Structures are given as structure tokens and as C-alpha cells.
Amino acid sequence: MSDFYDKVYDVVRLIPPGKVTSYGAIAAYLGSAQSSRMVGWAMNNAHVQEKYVPAHRVVNRNGLLTGKHHFGSLTIMQELLEAEGITIVDDQIVCFQKHFWNPMIELDME
């Protein structure tokens, strides 16, 4: 499981500021489309990684800040995203598709 988590963290570290992706998009990129919950569990442990993981850039498939409870304060995830130019209303990213970063497309291009 830690190998999968490490792969998740590697992908999350590649998400550019001002962009977000979903648990499912990461799972699909890693060849395990049914493992979006495991990606979520990895994000729950992101804060204890030696190398920084911008976990605030991972949201659910609808752009909801479902992981906000794991940031120590209910507003930190939103504050971090807003500092990167993303507007949040009622825990949801406004213009989600504009900010969506799909690793299947973006990392395939590199």
C-alpha cells in the first residue's frame, strides 16, 4: 500500500498551482480506476510526508472540498486554493473544469 501512496504523492506534487484534480483522476492515471478511496486515504496521510504534498489540490469529482476536515482547520484548504486564484463558494470550486488538471492528459504530454 505504501508504494501506491508514494505514486499518489508523486502525481499530486506535479499538480501546478491554480489547478486541481480529483481522487478518481489520480487513481485512473495510476491504472487503478476503482481506487479513488485509496487516493483519499493517501491524502489523509500527506501531511506527514517528508517531502511536501499539496493535498489541497485534490478534490472530489464535482469540485467539492471533501477533504477539508483533514487540514487542521475547516478553512485552510479553501484558503490555500484561494491563494492560488481559485474561487470557492459553499465548499465547491467555481468553474471547476477551468481549473481541472487531468494527469492522463497532462502527464502523457510530458
Image: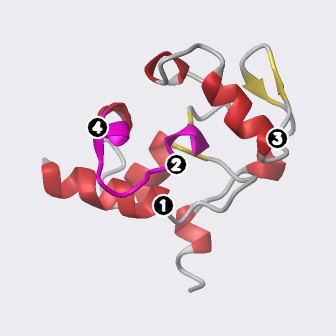
Q: Are marks 4 and 3 in contact (CB under 8 Å)?
A: no
Q: Which of the two labelled residues, at mark 2 and mark 3, occupies the earlier sequence position? A: 2
- Type of residue at label 4? Met
Nearer the observer: mark 4 or 1; the answer is: 1
**How far across and down, in percent of the image, does residue 4 sit?**
22, 54
Q: What distance separates the C-alpha of mark 1 from that of mark 3?
A: 18 Å
Residue 50 is inside the magenta segment? yes
Q: What distance separates the C-alpha of mark 4 from that of mark 1?
A: 17 Å
For the magenta stretch, what is the residue range? 45-58
- At a point 36% along the width and 58% down the height, the residue shown is 51
Q: Which mark is residue 54?
A: 2
- At a point 74% along the width and 24% down the height, the residue shown is 92
Residue behind mark 3: 86
Q: Which of the two labelled residues, at mark 1 and mark 3, occupies the earlier sequence position? A: 1
- Crowdedness of circle 1 by 10 Å Cα count: few (<14), some, many (20+)? some
Residue 55 is inside the magenta segment? yes
The secondary element bearing badge 3 is classed as loop
Residue 109, quarter of picture: bottom right
Residue behind mark 1: 13
**How far across and down, in percent of the image, does residue 93 sit?**
77, 31
